[in-house]
Amino acid sequence: MELTLLLKGIVIGFAMAVPIGPIGIICIRKTLTEGRMRGMIIGLGAATADMLYGSIAAFGLTIISDTLLSQRVWIRLAGGALLLYLGVRTFRARPKDPKIEIQSSGLLRSYFTTIFLTLTNPLTVFTFLAVFAALGLGNGLSLLSSSVLVAGVFAGSFLWFLSLSSGAIFFRKKLDLVGMTWVNKIAGILIIISGVIAIVSLV
């Protein structure tokens, strides 16, 4: 029973993470410009946020989900503003030589920033609720079963970002400083667009 729930959680987490959004763009860009470890930290942050939203759905924490829904405008506005800031900062970032080892400083900041950005889409929790209900994983699960399901969601989400960063790392050593500059410019523009969309969608 628990093994089946774990596998279902992995599939759900992977499928929820697959659409390439601003977090995926940041993961690819960080991997290309700063190495696999930075990309994996981004993935770990995104998987943690997916796990938190999955927990709200799996454990039936309606008070939290209702609160998130009522404050979704401010949450999305904060997320959009942060995306705009990160987009401009990325666009203006000076490229780093891919042959130089990147320091591990700032990993914790990257982790928590990613969690916050991922959590700024509170409607995700309702997607989890809908998917769980469609698969018969709604109310009625024991504490252990719900925990196993959520652990699977985390594993599946992280597996996607691990695959994404592993794919990007193959291109890292092929890029020179000019290539790194273009990575920053393109990623910055895409992140800015994501921020604009997040804010405009509130109108």
Image (tube, helix red, strand yellow):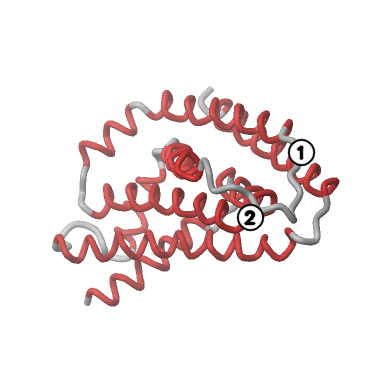
**Which element type, helix, strand or loop, lies under badge 2?**
loop
Query: As displayed, is residue 8 above or below residue 81?
Result: below
* Mark 2 or mark 1, earlier in chain: 2
Q: From the image, tell me which residue sits under label 1.
A: 185
The reply to whether callout 2 and callout 1 are in contact (CB within 8 Å) is no
Judged left or right of residue 159, residue 197 is: right
Q: Amino acid at mark 1?
A: Lys
Label 2: few (<14), some (14–19) or many (≥20) C-alpha neighbours in 10 Å: many
Q: Position of residue 141 (x, y in %)?
A: 17, 62
Taking the spot 27% from the left edge, 34% from the top edge, the residue there is 66
Front tag of 2 and 1: 2
Which residue carries the number 2 mark?
A: 35
Q: Residue at x 14, y 63 (%)?
A: 142
Q: Which residue appears at 42% of the width and 23% of the height?
A: 74
Q: Amino acid at mark 2?
A: Gly
Q: In the image, residue 88 lies at what x, y percent?
A: 68, 29
